[in-house]
Image: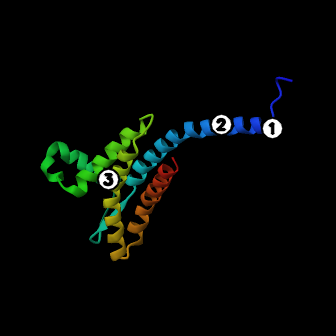
Amino acid sequence: MKGLRSPREVSVSKVGQNIKRVQNIKPMKINYLSALLVISSLIGYLEWGKTNHAFFFQVEYTILVKVFINPISVLHPLIIVPVASQVLLLFTIFQKKPSKVIIYICIGGLAALFLFVFSLGLMSANYRIMASTLPFIGVSILTIKQFRKI
């Protein structure tokens, strides 16, 4: 009986198929996590003074407008590094196999800003500011865990 295989052969072939299936899913999952990193980096929130407040996507729009009007006014490490990190993350979303190193560098560049904003919220006891940083911190932890599994 040539066509019959032992149960061990069947289970080994199924495991092999499952491993191939998981290997094909991981790059796509990383792309989704990169997209979530970009989206979560846009929903940070800041308050200053009594009536001033802005989300990060509003601040970034202002920065992009100022780059073309007066580029020197946006030359600051807390502006350049996070924006450059977001641009690099946008590139990794569309790559077939995103680089771990680039994504780690982008997480580090954005995390510097988000941890600073979190500490500002903590010092001023502003829970809205602290809560706005948690999605990015959570997605960053998930992304790092996903890379450790690969």
Point out the tag, 1 or 3, that comes first from the N-terminus. Answer: 1
Q: Distance between the residues labelled 1 and 3?
A: 60 Å
Of the pair 32 and 58, the residue shown nearer to us = 32
Q: How far apart are marks 3 and 2 (CA)?
A: 48 Å
Residue type at numbered disc 2: Gly
Spot occupied by residue 96 in the image (x, y as percentages of width and height):
45, 34
Q: How many marks?
A: 3
Give the labeled residue for mark 3.
Answer: 58
Residue type at numbered disc 1: Pro
Choose mark 3 or mark 2, whichever is in front: 2
Of the pair 56 and 84, the residue shown nearer to us = 84
Spot occupied by residue 128 in the image (x, y as percentages of width and height):
41, 68
Residue at the far top: name it.
2
Give the labeled residue for mark 1.
Answer: 7
Residue at the far right: name it.
1
Give neighbour class at mark 3: few <14, some 14-19, many 20+ (Cα, 10 Å).
some
Q: Which secondary structure, mark 3?
A: helix
Q: Which secondary structure, mark 2?
A: helix
Q: Distance between the residues labelled 1 and 2?
A: 14 Å
Which mark is drawn over residue 77?
Answer: none
Which mark is drawn over residue 16?
Answer: 2
